[in-house]
Image (cartoon, helix red, strand yellow):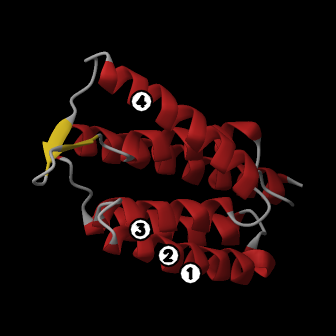
């Protein structure tokens, strides 16, 4: 029993560390409109560590397959200039964490936070960049992704299944 409690503690510690890294990625994206590849790699590595510690590794193949599918879809949006490369990477790793079983709550939270962020941009509360010849407005997307992913952690979607 003590071993399981220790394992739950470690799995939850990984979630806290992941949340801190997501917060850092969101701040970096807000300031520089850039998400470093190292952060994406660390977030992916933490997913695999958490899957092992929380005894979720048997379903890990579904999460990886789902994330690859999302990546393929997001590549289309990237090719159309609707998403940045960092957003594609971050969304892929976010859906790796969410998996099929938590995709709906993640998508709903993502929609909510992206809407709030967009309204904040229109009101001038957060920076909006104007890019391209048509001066389209862009906001940093990582804060919405990070908030939605932390939200599903808080809802218990990634709780250990020991």
Above or below for 5 versus 91? above
Mark 2 closeness class: few <14, some 14–19, many ≥20 residues within 10 Å: many
**Horizontal placement of 86 versus 6: left or right?**
left
Can residue 67 be seen from the camera position used here?
Answer: yes
- Residue 118: give x, y in percent of width and height: 40, 31
Which disc, if any, is residue 68?
1
Measured Cα–Cα span from mark 4 to mark 1: 27 Å
Residue at 48% across / 47% down in the picture?
145
Can residue 158 be seen from the camera position used here?
Answer: no
**Horizontal placement of 110 versus 55: left or right?**
left
Q: Which residue is mark 3?
A: 77
Res 156 → quadrant: top right
Residue at 38% across / 71% down in the picture?
41
Q: Which residue is mark 4?
A: 117
Marks 2/1 in contact by CB < 8 Å: the verdict is yes
Dot 2 falls on a residue whose secondary structure is: helix
């Amino acid at each position: 029993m003590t071993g399981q409690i220790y394992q739950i503690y470690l799995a939850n510690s990984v979630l806290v560390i992941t949340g801190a890294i997501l917060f850092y990625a969101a701040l970096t994206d807000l300031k520089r409109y850039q998400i470093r590849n190292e952060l994406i790699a660390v977030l992916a590595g933490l997913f695999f560590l958490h899957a092992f510690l929380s005894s979720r590794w048997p379903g890990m193949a579904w999460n990886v397959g789902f994330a690859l599918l999302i990546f393929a879809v997001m590549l289309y949006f990237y090719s159309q200039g609707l998403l940045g490369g960092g957003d594609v990477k971050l969304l892929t790793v976010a859906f790796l964490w969410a998996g099929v079983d938590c995709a709906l709550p993640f998508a709903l939270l993502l929609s909510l936070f992206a809407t709030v962020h967009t309204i904040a941009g229109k009101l001038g509360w957060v920076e909006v960049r104007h890019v391209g010849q048509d001066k389209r407005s862009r906001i940093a997307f990582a804060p919405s992704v990070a908030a939605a992913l932390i939200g599903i952690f808080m809802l218990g979607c990634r709780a250990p299944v020991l």
